[in-house]
Amino acid sequence: MASYNKVIMMGNLTRDPQLSYLPSQTPVVEFGLATNHRWRDREGNQKEDVCFVDCQCFGKSAENINKYFKKGRPIMIEGRLTFSTWEAQDGSKRSKHRIFIDNFTFVDSRGQDSAGSSDTNDYRNSNPEPPKDDDIPF
């Protein structure tokens, strides 16, 4: 059976990122993301639907998100969707979808330096090795 799990979303943080560390000292950050969908109904009235999703990121990317983002700031994320279930203290069953972030991108101009170039770098959650000299096509 084939499967593919990739999520790309752009929205605003609903709360400040919360950085913590796993027992292995791996940084992990959690935050909420809100995305909007606007449309007009048959009568021409403007409608809006908001989707709230919890997000989690690990490693150096987690530290960068914690450092540069706060509530209300836009972000573009790529990752995979997960589904967790648990039993609450009152005995009720709970569940939640969450996105584990692989990459993120700054989408506003707050990261501009003094020369005016916009910081739209893609921040990857892995550290790929640079190409060897013979692998470069020019």
Image (spheres, rainbow, N blue to C red):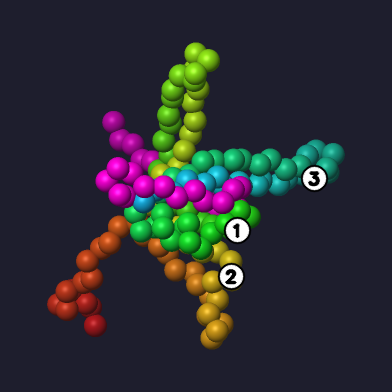
Going by the image, does 11 lie left or right of 59?
right
Q: Residues within 10 Å of mark 3 (few under 14, many from 20)?
A: few
The secondary structure type at the circle numbered 1 is loop
Residue 46, disc = 3
Measured in 3D between alpha carbons, the distance from the residue under mark 2 to the one under mark 3, in whole angstroms, is: 30 Å
The secondary structure type at the circle numbered 2 is helix
Residue underneath mark 1: 73
Image marks 1 and 2: residues in contact by CB distance under 8 Å: yes
Query: Residue 110, percent across and down?
Result: 58, 70
Viewer can see residue 104: yes
Image height of 125 relative to 43, above or below? below
Q: What residue span does the magenta drawing correspond to?
A: 1-26
Measured in 3D between alpha carbons, the distance from the residue under mark 1 to the one under mark 3, in whole angstroms, is: 25 Å
Image height of 6 relative to 90, above or below? below
Image height of 11 relative to 82, above or below? below
Query: Residue 97, percent across and down?
Result: 48, 34
Quarter of the image for residue 2 reads top left
Of mark 2 and mark 3, the one earlier in the sequence is 3
At horizontal 31% and vertical 50% (from top left) the residue drawn is 26
Residue underneath mark 2: 110
| 59 or 128: nearer the viewer | 59
| Amino acid type shown at disc 1 | Arg
| 138 or 25: nearer the viewer | 25
Query: Residue 93, percent across and down?
Result: 49, 17
Frontmost of labels 2 and 3 is 2
At horizontal 47% and vertical 38% (from top left) the residue drawn is 98
